[in-house]
Image: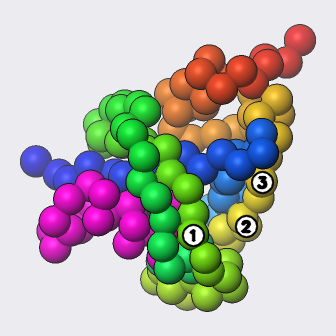
């Protein structure tokens, strides 16, 4: 059985922190929350999310809150989403190996107003549905 993917839901002042992903093999951008696969050496989901926050956002500390959602994506992978607050750090000091490989594309950090989330291609799609329902983002007319 594969380890779950652990994701951070970071909301500040009515905005959600997302990565705008552009990959060389896909023509259109899409959005994901910070996080990634839990590693064998992670002792807990909380430890995994703090590691991911440091790697992907360059933050030295963070507050992992409650688990807010769990889903299984189209590929059968489990994603566990925690509410998080980020501590001090500099986004420029990201250390994740994905940032070193140009074949992975770009990971642009963006603060998206909650009411615009419904208009974006957020992956996995079940996470987008949850965000729209739970955090009041309106659907386009």
Name the residue carrying label 2.
Answer: 108
Task: Please give the name of the residue rendered at 50% of the width and 79% of the height, measured from the top-left corner.
Answer: 60
- Tell me where the magenta segment starts and ends, as one range: 27-54
Residue count near mark 2 (Cα–Cα under 10 Å), binned few <14, some 14–19, many ≥20: few
Pick the residue in front: 63 or 28: 63
Name the residue carrying label 1.
Answer: 87
Specify whether residue 64 is in view.
yes
Q: Is residue 42 magenta?
A: yes
Whether residues under marks 3 and 1 lie with C-beta atoms below 8 angstroms apart, the answer is no
Within the image, what quadrant is residue 119 found in?
Answer: top right
**Whole-percent x and y of residue 64?**
42, 54
Name the element at disc 3.
Answer: strand
Looking at the image, is 17 positioned above or below residue 23? above
First of labels 3, 1 by sequence position: 1
Question: Which residue extends farthest left?
Answer: 1
Is the C terminus in the top left, top right, bottom left or bottom right quadrant?
top right
Within the image, what quadrant is residue 36 found in?
Answer: bottom left
Name the element at disc 2.
Answer: strand
Looking at the image, is 55 positioned above or below residue 107? below
Specify whether residue 105 is in view.
no
Looking at the image, is 88 positioned above or below residue 131? below
Residue count near mark 3 (Cα–Cα under 10 Å), binned few <14, some 14–19, many ≥20: some
Cα separation between marks 3 and 1 = 16 Å
Task: Please give the name of the residue rendered at 60% of the width and 50% of the height, measured from the top-left corner.
Answer: 10
**Whole-percent x and y of residue 87?**
57, 69
Whether residues under marks 3 and 2 lie with C-beta atoms below 8 angstroms apart, the answer is no
């Amino acid at each position: 059985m594969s380890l779950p993917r652990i994701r951070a839901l970071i909301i500040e002042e009515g905005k959600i922190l997302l990565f705008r992903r552009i990959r060389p093999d896909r023509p259109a951008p899409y959005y994901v929350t910070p996080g990634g696969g839990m590693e064998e050496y992670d002792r807990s989901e909380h430890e995994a999310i703090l590691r991911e926050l440091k790697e992907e956002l360059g933050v030295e500390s963070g507050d992992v809150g409650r688990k807010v959602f769990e889903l299984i994506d189209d590929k059968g992978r489990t994603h566990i989403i925690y509410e998080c607050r980020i501590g001090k750090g500099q986004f420029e000091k990201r250390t994740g190996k994905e940032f070193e490989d140009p074949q992975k594309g770009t990971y642009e950090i963006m603060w998206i107003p909650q009411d615009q989330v419904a208009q974006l291609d957020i992956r996995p799609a079940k996470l987008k549905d949850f965000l729209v329902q739970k955090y009041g983002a309106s659907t386009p007319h």
